Image (cartoon, helix red, strand yellow):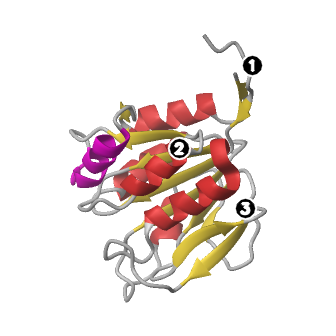
């Protein structure tokens, strides 16, 4: 038995969603307190030619400031960063947002796999990933990278997700990711974030 006392601070949350994920995001963000001591970065697949209304919609439910990530912006706690339409949202060392218009990943740009993987590379075990409703497999490979780096991963309960393909594929690849409702995910984040875990 390993008796090493390894302490981990978890303060970076990355979230993936597509069809049907907005309602879960509203519920989740509404439960996070204004002093939630983590950065929250979100990739939602949207129509690149549609209006950028997601930040204003989610901002009505969140006590945390919600906005679109900007190139070169530092990742700070108690803020919500959304991927802009048609740009990959990535994290580069030492914790800076990079927007990339490179090739689509699994037919998606922005792609959650790019966010999850780069967050895991920079922040390692500090990352918690959430995969919400959606009709493809984006986020599943990234959740594996988060877990491999020592982070945590959760998925929305498939029976609650309007389109459960993304949570199901993530569960298939990560095996042990807890299945939670949106409210349960918020409570799990509040418990896991901001305190040091052995």
Q: Residue at x 45, y 49 (%)?
A: 143
CA–CA distance in space, label 3 to label 2: 22 Å
Give SS at disc 1. Answer: loop
63 lies above or below 105: above
Say which residue label 2 marks: 148
Q: Residue at x 28, y 63 (%)?
A: 19
> What is the quadrant of residue 166 in the picture?
bottom left
Q: Residue at x 38, y 41 (%)?
A: 174
17 lies above or below 188: below
Residue 60 or residue 180, whichever sits in front: 180
Classed neighbour count for the residue bearing mark 1: other residues with Cα under 10 Å, few (<14), some (14–19), many (≥20): few
* Quadrant of the rendering where the C terminus is positioned: top right
Say which residue label 3 marks: 75
The answer to whether residue 50 of the structure is visible from this angle is yes
* 1 and 3 marks in contact (CB < 8 Å): no
Give SS at disc 3. Answer: loop
Give SS at disc 2. Answer: helix
* Quadrant of the rendering where the N terminus is positioned: top right
CA–CA distance in space, label 1 to label 3: 28 Å
* 3 and 2 marks in contact (CB < 8 Å): no
The stretch in magenta equals 161-174
Residue 156 horizontal side relative to residue 84, left or right = left
Among the two numbered marks 1 and 3 on one chain, the one whose residue lies closer to the N terminus: 1
Q: Main secondary structure of the magenta part?
A: helix
Q: Is residue 166 magenta?
A: yes
Where's residue 6, x and y in %? 73, 25
Say which residue label 1 marks: 5
CA–CA distance in space, label 2 to label 1: 19 Å
């Amino acid at each position: 038995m390993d008796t090493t006392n390894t302490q981990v601070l978890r303060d970076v949350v990355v979230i993936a969603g597509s069809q049907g994920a907005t309602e879960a995001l509203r519920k989740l963000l509404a439960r996070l307190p204004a002093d939630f001591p983590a950065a929250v970065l979100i990739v939602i697949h949207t129509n690149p030619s549609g209006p950028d209304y997601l930040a204003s919609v989610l901002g009505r439910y969140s006590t945390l400031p919600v906005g679109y990530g900007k190139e070169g912006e530092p990742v700070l706690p108690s803020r919500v960063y959304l991927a802009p339409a048609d740009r990959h949202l990535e994290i580069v060392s030492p914790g800076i947002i990079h927007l990339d218009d490179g090739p689509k990943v699994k037919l998606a740009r922005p792609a959650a796999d790019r966010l999850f993987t780069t967050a895991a590379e920079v922040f390692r075990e500090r990352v918690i990933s959430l995969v919400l409703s959606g009709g493809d497999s984006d986020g599943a490979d990234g959740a594996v990278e988060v877990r491999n780096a020592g982070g945590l991963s959760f998925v929305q309960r498939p029976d609650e997700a309007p389109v459960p393909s993304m949570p199901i594929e993530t569960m298939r690849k990560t095996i042990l990711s807890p299945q939670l409702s949106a409210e349960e995910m918020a409570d799990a984040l509040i418990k896991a974030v901001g305190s040091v875990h052995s």
